[in-house]
Amino acid sequence: MALTNESAEPSPGLDRRTALLAAAIEEIARRGTRGLRVEEVAKRARVSPALIYHHFGDRATLLQSALEHIGNQADVYTARSGASARDNLVAMLLAELQDDPVVKANSAAWGELRDSAIFDEALRPTLTQLTQQWCDDIAALIQAGHHDGSIPSTADPRALGVQLSALVEGISSRWLTGQLTTRQARRHLNAMIEGVLR
Amino acid sequence: MALTNESAEPSPGLDRRTALLAAAIEEIARRGTRGLRVEEVAKRARVSPALIYHHFGDRATLLQSALEHIGNQADVYTARSGASARDNLVAMLLAELQDDPVVKANSAAWGELRDSAIFDEALRPTLTQLTQQWCDDIAALIQAGHHDGSIPSTADPRALGVQLSALVEGISSRWLTGQLTTRQARRHLNAMIEGVLR
């Protein structure tokens, strides 16, 4: 670590933290949460394990922070400005299924962290909050679609928020296990969205 | 092991194998596949680890056999004889979400094994085959619904086989992580099925 150079960068602590989280997400995507070793994350990020403990305190906080980071990143790559609220909704949901190594690693790590929450109750509040945010984002787009006329008023925003996000998770898992190609996964997701928004 | 008594039972090898698989599934549901230790499965089933190796050869075969056993059990508890093919389809899908410890353990273990297949390619052929069977069962019920008039002919059997099974998996995961109650999970699943079968 070049401590003397750190002050020259805009926000070195933040950049380093982001790099450490990216390394943690890649490790989780490759080995799962239970197989996650702080030493391996450190090795991948080319830092000392002590630095990771310095930034995240403990392994549990590292897992939670990784979950939050995935949520924040998804906000970025799923943001779209289409012609209608419906277009935005479809684009936002389909953005979860794309041939991009970051999206794929995030999706695999998200699935791992989510399923770890079945046993690891400490992960549940963060998982629940992020999932709720995702459901709310979908619900907001459906409401916007009621207003701009692109989504029928019979479509229930809150219920579809839960249902469509759960569907994305189910289809992602088929995609990540190689049972569906990216193209097939996107086609299936799109067909279901069209089916329920008639 | 009471070897002298074994010959009195109808199929002791099969019964013991089933008991060992049930113990493996409970362990996977509690600790995940990566945390699975043959010693813990043996302890839960009250047998020696050697007996497990005798029945399954190695850990990888034990995981595959557990996956197959979950598939076979699901065939039993999802079998229904409703008034129409549509009723049977809805009942079969909803049967995956019920307050039954065996169903819950199977669902959690299935999710674990499925997500392990992202990294563990040896599990993929069995996973793919069982998932395909599930999709085919759904498709067959939709075709039966075309014939008995309970499902509109516009509903695509193969596509909906993939889509509805993926939806069940997505909703199951919300349910197992405590984000949805059994009642909520069933209501959401039912609403989506009705939505796409209009």
Image (cartoon, coloured by chain):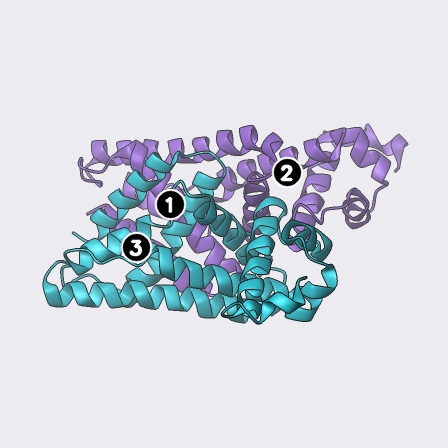
Chain colours: A purple, B cyan
Q: Residue at position x 50%, y 65% from top?
A: B68
Q: Quadrant of residue A79?
A: top left
Compare residues A180 and B35 and report the one nearer the observer: B35
Picture residue at 77% right of the left edge, 50% below the top:
A44
Identify the mark at residue A66; answer none if there is no mark: 2
- Amino acid type of the residue tagged 3 in the rendering: Met
Which residue is labeled 1 in the image? B97
Mark 1 on the same chain as mark 2:
no
Closer to the camera, A68 or A95?
A68
- Residue at mark 1: chain: B
Q: Chain of mark 2?
A: A
CA–CA distance between discs 2 and 3? 36 Å
How much space separates mark 1 and mark 3, taking CA atoms?
A: 10 Å
Is residue B42 rendered to the left or right of residue A97?
right
Please report, as a chain letter, where disc 3 is located.
Answer: B
Tag 2 and tag 3, C-beta contact below 8 Å: no
Q: Which residue is mark 3?
A: B92
Residue at mark 1 shares a chain with residue at mark 3? yes
Q: Nearer the viewer, mark 1 or mark 2?
A: 1
Secondary structure at badge 1 equals loop
